[in-house]
Image: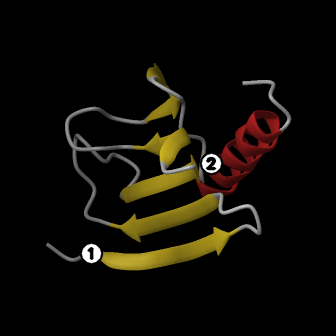
Amino acid sequence: MSVNLLFYRKNIEPNGDVVEMKIWQVPHSKDKPHGLKYSLVYVREGRRIIGYDNAEGKGDHRHYRNKEYPYHFRGVDALIEDFHSDVEKAKRGEL
């Protein structure tokens, strides 16, 4: 199986918050119909606050604190925009 890292960015903010994004190109499959595997996470004080991923067998979904919700994947640009939007909302206390 050929897996290629397409995108990686990790930012540690002055207050210690971590924003990390990883996107890989993988073979198309029932589990990964768009040919991508991704993990985007916002961590505060060692706890995941926001997470977007498509873990094996779960499909596209996102995490808000301790709850998991389906996510409609519309492409990499929209994924990153949606994630950043949620991170900003979490920072303002809206999530």
- For disc 1, the marked residue is 3
Dot 2 alpha-carbon crowd within 10 angstroms: few under 14, some 14 to 19, many 20 or more = some
**Residue type pointed to by label 2:** Leu
Query: Residue 87 is drawn in which quadrant?
Result: top right
Residue at the extreme right of the image, as rendered: 92
Q: Name the side, left or right, on which 85 lies relative to 11.
A: right
Q: Position of residue 17 (x, y in %)?
A: 65, 58
Q: Name the side, left or right, on which 71 lies relative to 14.
A: left
Q: Position of residue 81 (x, y in %)?
A: 74, 49
Q: Is residue 82 above or below residue 19?
A: above
- Using the image as rendered, state which of residue 16 and residue 39 is in the foreground: 16
Query: Residue 56 is drawn in which quadrant?
Result: top left
Q: Secondary structure at mark 2?
A: helix
- For disc 2, the marked residue is 79
Q: Position of residue 54 (x, y in %)?
A: 36, 43
Q: Is residue 19 above or below residue 12?
A: above
Badge number at residue 62: none
Which residue is found at the position 22% from the left and 40% from the top?
A: 30
Dot 1 alpha-carbon crowd within 10 angstroms: few under 14, some 14 to 19, many 20 or more = few
Which residue is found at the position 81% from the left and 43% from the top?
A: 88
Q: Name the side, left or right, on which 16 lies relative to 91.
A: left
Q: Secondary structure at mark 1?
A: loop
Q: Earlier in the sequence, mark 1 or mark 2?
A: 1
Q: Position of residue 53 (x, y in %)?
A: 42, 45
Identify the coloring: secondary structure
**Residue type pointed to by label 1:** Val
How far apart marks 1 and 2 lie (CA) works out to 20 Å
In the picture, the quarter occupied by the C terminus is top right
In the picture, the quarter occupied by the N terminus is bottom left
